[in-house]
Image: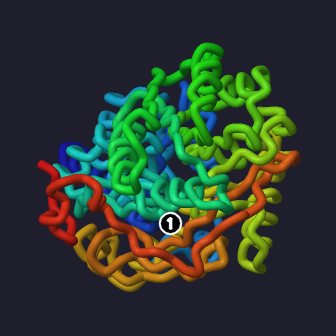
Amino acid sequence: MQRRSLIKAFTLSASIAAMGLSWTIQAAETIKVGILHSLSGTMAISETSLKDMALMTIEEINAKGGVNGKQLEPVVVDPASNWPLFAEKARQLLTQDKVAVVFGCWTSVSRKSVLPVFEELNGLLFYPVQYEGEELSPNVFYTGAAPNQQAIPAVEYLMSEEGGAAKRFFLLGTDYVYPRTTNKILRAFLLSKGVAEKDIEEVYTPFGHSDYQTIVANIKKFAAGGKTAVVSTINGDSNVPFYKELANQGLDATEVPVVAFSVGEEELRGIDTKPLVGHLAAWNYFQSVDNPVNSEFVEKWKAYAKAKGLPNADKAVTNDPMEATYVGIHMWAQAVEKAGTTEVDKVREALAGQTFAAPSGYTLTMDATNHHLHKPVMIGEVQEDGQFSVVWQTEGPIRAQPWSPFIPGNESKPEYAVKSN
């Protein structure tokens, strides 16, 4: 009896071990990919579409055979516009879910929150949104714009005859690191161009701010002092009440143009855009750009939104951070194929010099040393249908300057990535 029991126990143990091995093999057949975007809270208006774009891109890659013969398996988490929660969710993705890479964050405060986690654990983050620069981590690849690929060209345009020859500038932003640092750079730039301190106004509002009546009235007063433009670094759902208040007070683009750095097609879906015609946004891509790659990209996204039953799928739009997400995931996949592994150090090396024919109509290159994309710069004018007409653009992609020359001391900063801690 004892011998029979031992045989049964051995057989059971062998079966359990075999099951464990089977699960291990099954798990090894996929590559886990983290998606870290706010699906609730003040930033959900902007970030939800990036999560959906990431899922569409992963489906597209999987349909073509995956990466190195393995399917990509998305792991989606919701940090809920809660900055400390971003760090917790990032740690969960890297240590518990064992993802090979993370695509995520929108605000710089969320990126700053997760940065120590990625550097400590040697994780890899692809960050798809324009930002203030002043950072160059070996654990982050920046697929959005640095200031010289968005903010500086936009203000130069406003100062030009073509852009309205603005002499006074009202810098209005949400109160966190991206607007404050960007405006520090812009203030130094404007002063270098001979704009007087009295002709620069700087105002900040908290996340989720909704009452812009007094601020818009103050913009009107400030504009009485000469040709004025507003540079908006307002983020998230606060854009809706801000633009509504502009319309309420009859402040149109011919009087005081607003150029936004965080408003695209997605944010305009919730606004009556007729009173906003002529206001501007600076990005590296617009849905309206006319080329075969973009036509296919837009149609693919609209079909995906409809097939998945996404909210307002009949009005689905693409925008700049969505394109940057799409490009980033494809570039990472290309680098993994080149490296033959998802090992972070080898993928990082393989990313240098990667290229991708982007929906913007340009072939984008991941810089060999500074972890940023070479990107074109475009300025678009709001149209009645919520799309943008491109009124100005660079001839080709521009190399990013992560360390702005308008901040003292940056001339001695290294061109290569260095841990921030």
Q: Residue at x 40, y 74 (%)?
A: 399
Quarter where residue 230 is shown: top right
Q: Which residue is drawn at 15% across and 63% down?
A: 413
Task: From this view, report whether residue 94 is shown above or below residue 101.
Answer: above
Give 158 or 246, whichever is nearer the viewer.
158
Which residue is identified by label 1? Answer: 329
- Left or right, 331 with reference to 312: left
Q: Quadrant of the N terminus?
A: top left
| Res 421 visible | yes
Residue 74 image position (x, y, % from top left): 51, 53
How many labels sit on residues?
A: 1
Describe the element under mark 1 as helix, strand or loop: helix
- Left or right, 221 with reference to 250: left
> In this figure, which colouring scheme has been used for the structure?
rainbow
Quarter where residue 143 is shown: bottom left
Task: From this view, report whether residue 158 is shown above or below residue 138.
Answer: above
Q: Residue at x 54, y 62 (%)?
A: 324
Give 375 or 333, whichever is nearer the viewer.
375
Give 37 or 146, whichever is nearer the viewer.
146
Task: From this view, report whether residue 39 is shown above or below residue 62.
Answer: above
| Res 32 visible | no
Quarter where residue 350 is shown: bottom left
Residue 231 image position (x, y, % from top left): 54, 42
Q: How crowded is mark 1: few (under 14 residues within 10 Å), some or many (20 or more)?
A: many
Q: Residue at x 41, y 28 (%)?
A: 175
- Left or right, 278 with reference to 323: right
Residue 66 image position (x, y, % from top left): 54, 73
Residue type pointed to by label 1 = Ile
